[in-house]
Amino acid sequence: MTQIKEKTLSLRYVDAMGHGWNLGNSFDSFHKEEDKEELSWGNPRVTKELLQTVKKKGFKNIRLPLTVHMRIDGPENDFTINESFLNRYEEAVKESLEEGFYVMINIHHDSVTWLKEWNGQNDSDRYKKYVRIWEQLSERFKDYDERVMFESINEPQFDVEESVGIQYLEKLNDTFYHIVRQSGGNNGTRMLVLPTLLTNDSQNKLDALYEQIVGFDDPYILATVHYYSVWVYSANIGKTRFDQTLWEDVTPRTSLVEVFDRVTETFIDKGIGVVIGEYGLLGYDKSESANQFGETLKYLEYINYYANKKGMSLILWDNGQHLNRYEYEWYLPRFGEIIERSMKERSAYSKGLDTEYLTDPLPEEGLAIPLVLNGHILEEVRTHSRELIKGKEYTLEGEALHLSESFFKQLYEETLGEIGLTVTLILTFSGGADWYHHLIYSDKPVLKETVGKVGAAVQIPTVFNGNHLESLMVKDSNNESVANNKELEYLQHSLEFKPAEESIYLLPDFTSQLQDGDYTIHVTFFSGMRVLYQLHVKNGEIKGK
């Protein structure tokens, strides 16, 4: 935690609220044809069992996004929010408090459905609508205790240039502040959460918010930004690893440190508490496989560690893709475990990838796997069927796990070196989560011929031979990149391409860019193996080989 002479009320509040979880795509969801309230985007009704599960997972606060779009009357009825919907939302607030959570009330998708078109004027219906929303919410929740906090608006954005957008946001935050403070009850000392423009961490946006908060001279204010890591890594546009160089000396890890350090210097070091109101990786919005799983675990471990070090509250964004709201368990247990552990302590992991691709069934002199121990001691190495013998099958040399030649001889006897067969080593340490390290027998992958059409998905039959696809880069006959984001060169996972069990799919967002001519796809696998694949396009027909 950041050390200052005496912690302010704002900083102490963040300490008390701890790390949290977003109830995403429930009360913030909406349906144009028929309002299904919290069910609108496919998530089930929020239950007490769900909230209890979130609590058992170790989260101490819950952010409850709320969208009133399509649930609010027009100016003729003074922008009155639908009573039954608001009642149901209040139920969720009450039940969250009963479970012991700190609760953040947040206006969510209204920022993009109608508020972004505000012209900055007080006589605008959009401004009056915003005023009435917070008048109603302030009245509704004014007698709730200090564990309820209000956030002015989610990811604020406006259809104007940035400098004007910052001015618009300052006006909205000011309006929000005075509405709440003058509404009576406990709202005079209610903790208020104010975002930067787009909840972005650019220094000019941080500075603008800092100046506004200082101007209020009010100890009951928190600052908030969101963090989804660097776009090229977060959405998987060819850069897949947490410690991979993105440009110059920047990696996803160093970028996180740089951002959190600047946020700390701007706010925390000056006594203003900080909430990372949403965090995660953008690839998960499209597919569980979009981001390399071991590298995701490293990111989750480190962001929790560094937020703890800086004294920030992290709130995981979960729109239903992480915690199963039917079975009340994590969809990916190790994803959840690393978060649960990392809120309290560090975990150890492999320094490199979590997978070794074996082309030699009996590596001479064995194999060394560098580890990052983070202060822990390696206690046990096992597979799903047996424990490895320390000193004979493995040793720990410094911070490297060394698998002996005798281990690989035994492994080969058990597996016969079958291509594609995976053996998982489970590493248990003195603290933190277990680490899973995979050994896969592999051979060169084979991409077969295909045909398809421009603008449609094209399936390339693929024999992976134990490999996993890492990235695709496409060049035309002039050696120019073909991609939605030409500056980044690589195709975006789950938007422009996606691997399947026995295929690689080129998706419509990619193939729609193709014109008559020849293209070369540079296909890279995590094993380091590479394949060149040719596309020929003529009259909208695609042939690949």
Image: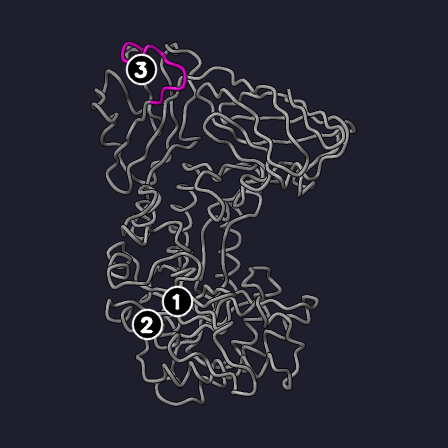
Mark in the foreground, 3 or 2: 2
Q: Nearer the viewer, mark 3 or mark 1?
A: 1
Quadrant containing the N terminus is bottom left
In the displayed structure image, the side of residue 117 where residue 478 appears, left or right: right
SS category of the residue bearing label 1: strand
What residue do we see at 24% from left, 67% from top? 99
Q: Secondary structure at mark 3?
A: loop
At 39% from the left and 90% from the top, the residue drawn is 184
Q: What is the secondary structure assignment of the residue under circle 2?
A: helix
User: Where 53 sits versus 405, above or below?
Assistant: below
Residue farthest right in this picture:
478
Name the N-terminal-most of marks 3 and 2.
2
Judged from this view, the residue extending furthest toward the front is 33
Crowdedness near tag 1: few (<14), some (14–19) or many (≥20) residues, C-alpha within 10 Å: many
**Mark carried by residue 93:** 2
Tell me, yes or no, if residue 525 can be seen here. Answer: yes
Label annotation for residue 404: 3
- The C terminus is located in which quarter? top right
Span colored in magenta? 410-422
Q: How much space separates mark 2 and mark 1, taking CA atoms?
A: 8 Å
The answer to whether mark 3 and mark 2 are in CB contact below 8 A is: no
